[in-house]
Amino acid sequence: MSKVTMPVEQQIPIQQVDYRAVLSEQEIAAIEHECSLYEERAAAGIDALKIVQDHRRWVSDESLYAIADLLQMPVVQLEGVATFYNLIYRQPVGEHVIHLCDSISCWLHDFPKIAEHLKAKLGIDFGQTTADGKVTLLTNVCLGCCDTAPALMLDGDLVENLDIPSIDNMLGKLTARGGKND
Amino acid sequence: MANIIIDNQQYEVADGQNLLQACLSLKKDLPYFCWHPAMGSVGACRQCAMTQYHDENDTRGRLIVACMTPVTDGMRVSMEQPQETEFREQVIDALMTHHPHDCPVCAEGGECHLQDMTVMTGHYKRGFKGKKTTFQNQQLGPLIKHEMNRCITCYRCERFYKDYAGGTDLAAQSSRNKVYFGRQCDGTLESEFAGNLVEVCPTGVFTDKPFGDHYSRKWDMQAAPSVCQHCSTGCNVTLSERYGSVRRVTNRFNDHLNGYFLCDRGRFGFDFVNSEQRQQHISLGGQSVNWSDAEVQQRLKAKGTWVGIGSSQASLEDNFALQLLVGAENFCVADDPQSEHLLELHMAILQQWPQASLAQMEQADAIVIIGEDINNSAPRIGLAIRQALLNNAKQQVKNVGVPEWQDSAVRQVLPHNKVPLAVVGYQQGALAEQATIRLVADDKQTAEQAFLLANLLCEKSPKPRVSKVHSQIEEIAEVLKTAKRPLIVGGWSANNSAVLSAVANICKALANPQGMLCIAPPAANTVGLGLLMQAGYLANEAVESKLKSEECNLLVLDHTSDSRQQWLQTLSKQTNNVVCLQQLAQGENNSLSLPISSFSECSGSQLNYQGLIQSYSPASKPAGQCRPAWQWLVDLGKLQNIAELASVEHLGQLHLMMSKLFPTLAEHFTELSGRQFAMQSPRYSGRTAMLANQTVHEPKPFSEAGAPYKQSMEGLLPGQNDQHPLAYSWSPGWNSNQSNHKFRDEFRGPELKSQQGIFAVPNHPECFWFKWQASWSANTKANYKILAVEEVFGSDSLAEFAGAIQQLSKSAYVVVLPKVASSLNIEAGQWVTLDDHPTLFAVKISDHVPAKSILLYSPAHEAAISDGCDEIKVASKQKISALHKRQQAQQDVQSQQKQLHKQRLLDQDQHIPIQFIEGAM
Ligand code: SF4
Ligand code: SF4
Ligand code: FES
Ligand code: FES
């Protein structure tokens, strides 16, 4: 969540954004379709955020205001939704996003070692993106595969039974192929 | 009633409430955070945990949260067993994992519900070893300070701001241990009820910013029960004082009026009493003079008729004294003939129809607002109406066995169970947007359609000239016929007698004994003037001619409105002797002006929109030569040999005289028997030392003769006498305003208790129809009819003297229809001029503007505009840049003044001139 800290007088708040000026026709059509499935437009908030994120990798302030405008809902309410879910990115992320599970089973299965290795290999800490913009490293709560711990999620797919070689293997492949959203 | 067993003790408690309410009603100390008496339960904090047992053989029981558990007959619970007390202690531990423990620098300290609950649960040692999260605070504008680290995530702020008050710019964000309550980005909180966050938040996240600039602890402040001066609702407030200046206004619970909440105009507008512009000395043509000066005496004793002009901003006592002095036949009650006419009409309606209280309005099951901008003219009433909109949803959950205090259940079913809200007229804003039936009409059409509505309800009701009934009106008629407790709202916003008459006709036509009416007059004591009017008055139209034809002197009770200033300018051309009783110096002229005490410095009474008489008490002593206006008037009475008035020595005598004339008032003015209330808490510090730099003698406490309150720490404590309002709310262990439940039952029960107090306007049960008058059908010839709209901040001329309110006031604007905008080629946000009027207006565009009309807002201190205009023109570049320069200069002046104001108050704290401390030396 990015918070503006300038004094009110100096700040240039994003007043009202016209969604047509920000969102693509494709995005608008997809969001409108979701709206048609709910009783209230605001209920399509999560879907709309996901749609925009699919197109742009992350949800910028401008996108947030545009979605709120399209859904005719208060922007702070949409921000509440966007920041509630850790898979909605409110800051730019790399081409690939790794969510390493840091909950109890994974923790017991060498989380610290794996985390260290990942960080060292990528040269970044949690919450950061590699300088080439390829990979963002984040944590996640239990991924629901405690039986195959330790685990991580790479671009939405599970990678289980992690060990050092399998991580190296995975990272090797990442540099070989393009980003998910390219 | 239900019999319940708490800790093996049997109690009888009212049905329908939850266990937390029951425990608090029994005056037990059960800690809680998220529950709020006006907002119901959501079970977010788990602080109110208790144990429930199956039967007497069950020794283990199970933990429950009291606020989510309805009381049932025979239920067996415990509150003081280790199981639940330890749990409650741990809840505090968990809620406080991020709390910075910064009470010494927190404005909430000393009246903090979190402090109280922490002590109550016995939590004293931090168990959590992890790091604290440090949040970034937001700039939320001039009223509210944000300190997010102190949050305990009880969700009260969001529930109040968004759910209760309908605000759209504050919500919970993020998740887990990063939950954040604020706006999307920095910026002024938009809701006019934001100030309530200060009292709703149980910790110091949201605090009162102006108060923080000139701060004092609650226990160090002298508190007085008072009444808000900024609209006709008459919300009950507490004024707090230290070192001679009033520091803040807080809510004073009144079950039928404000309940637990105020609007920001009331909470922050009081600061006019500390304004630089307060007049403190007698002045003549702007120069300080003395009472005994020959010229002053000559002015005061001048021969000829004295014409008095009353004021709806002054107390009943002051106006009454003025009326006595000049005689009813020379006492004028209004600034223009139209207001006078409205007042006459209003009083006639008030005599026929009792006005619903806010608590009663909250029970309405259908609401029709006729031509009144209630959101802006009486904000707290607007908030009450908003609550009524929940009633069908509440009924719906009750039907399936869920209690109505289950707030999220109620809000879940709300979209499908709306209470019909009809809005007829041109008012904009939050309430109008909630309307289920909306008819956009100018004031004349509003009146016509309202007359037709009355006629649809009852054939005998007179018809207007037109006969075309809009379909919305037919719909409203159907709604009203089936509603059990319909509420009709009208008022002075449209400045139109036909609208007021129509509202009365609708009530008569409805003939529903459960039906409710609310008519909002413009000022705090408008109805008080209306009452005095019954004893006779001088017609507004006659004033000028009287001044022209006879040797006349003018005696004016202070009113800060622009229309009053303009009228006085005209009048002062007709007479050489104008004497003003003034609290705020406005403009230079040749008048003699006597400085009068503000409502925070003397006792007085006023009548709210219902005609309910309410009195306020002084929180501080008047500064300089200020005295209550009635005292000046008594002295004038002595000079002019008005025997009746000259004999008055204290307010009690004036009250007696008023009671003779208006016998209903007698009961309200009963004198106090027995001890007085202490206005200072027993912990008040520095009593003997705070003035030691000036005198070593401890000053004698100040109190007015016969007043029930004493500016001292000696006297009755809260709760020791329930005949008079509490000076401040405090009970052992309950330092915050949550102590309220120790003094009254916070569970209302199924039936609303009737409203206490004296309604000063006598009821005449016989009521009549108001006929449509031919003059009402006239229409303006101008191209655009101008319909004036109000703003919470900016339309009350008195509150404009409070720095914080001034900062929030909008500049003038007009609202036009999209087709008008496109035909004139103007866009929203552009500046335009109207005819050759000098003011620049910002353009807004809306579909909800009546045809051939424009809506216009101009701030209270800018010249009013006539009722029509022919031409809307884009303002020239020079004019716009001149305006920007002016605005910039104004902002600079404002922020400079803010600094000076702050400094002046701080300086003043150390230098209370000794002569103003009664009993000193
Ligand atoms: S800011 Fe205050 S009211 Fe809001 S959740 Fe936090 S503690 Fe509760
Ligand atoms: S609603 Fe009216 S009386 Fe109540 S606080 Fe606001 S301005 Fe004052
Ligand atoms: S704890 Fe990692 S998958 Fe469950
Ligand atoms: S007060 Fe009962 S759970 Fe919060």
Image (cartoon, coloured by chain):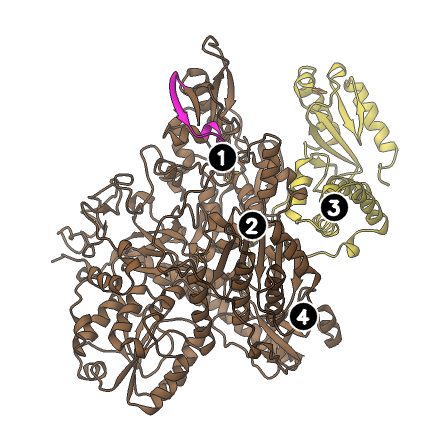
**Disc 4 or disc 3, which is closer to the eye?**
4
Residue at image position (24%, 40%) is B682
Q: Amino acid at mark 4?
A: Ser
Where does label 1 land, which residue?
Answer: B35
Q: Colour of chain A?
A: yellow
Chain of the residue under the numbered disc 1 shown in the image: B
- Give the secondary structure at mark 1: loop
- Crowding at label 3, few (<14), some or many (≥20) Cα neighbours within 10 Å? some
Residue B467, numbered label = 4
Chain of the residue under the numbered disc 4 shown in the image: B
Kindly report the distance in space between the C-alpha atoms of the residues bearing marks 4 and 3: 40 Å
Quadrant occupied by the C terminus of chain B: bottom left
Q: Are marks 1 and 4 in contact (CB under 8 Å)?
A: no
Q: Quarter for ligand 3?
A: top right
Chain of the residue under the numbered disc 3 shown in the image: A
Kindly report the distance in space between the C-alpha atoms of the residues bearing marks 2 and 4: 32 Å
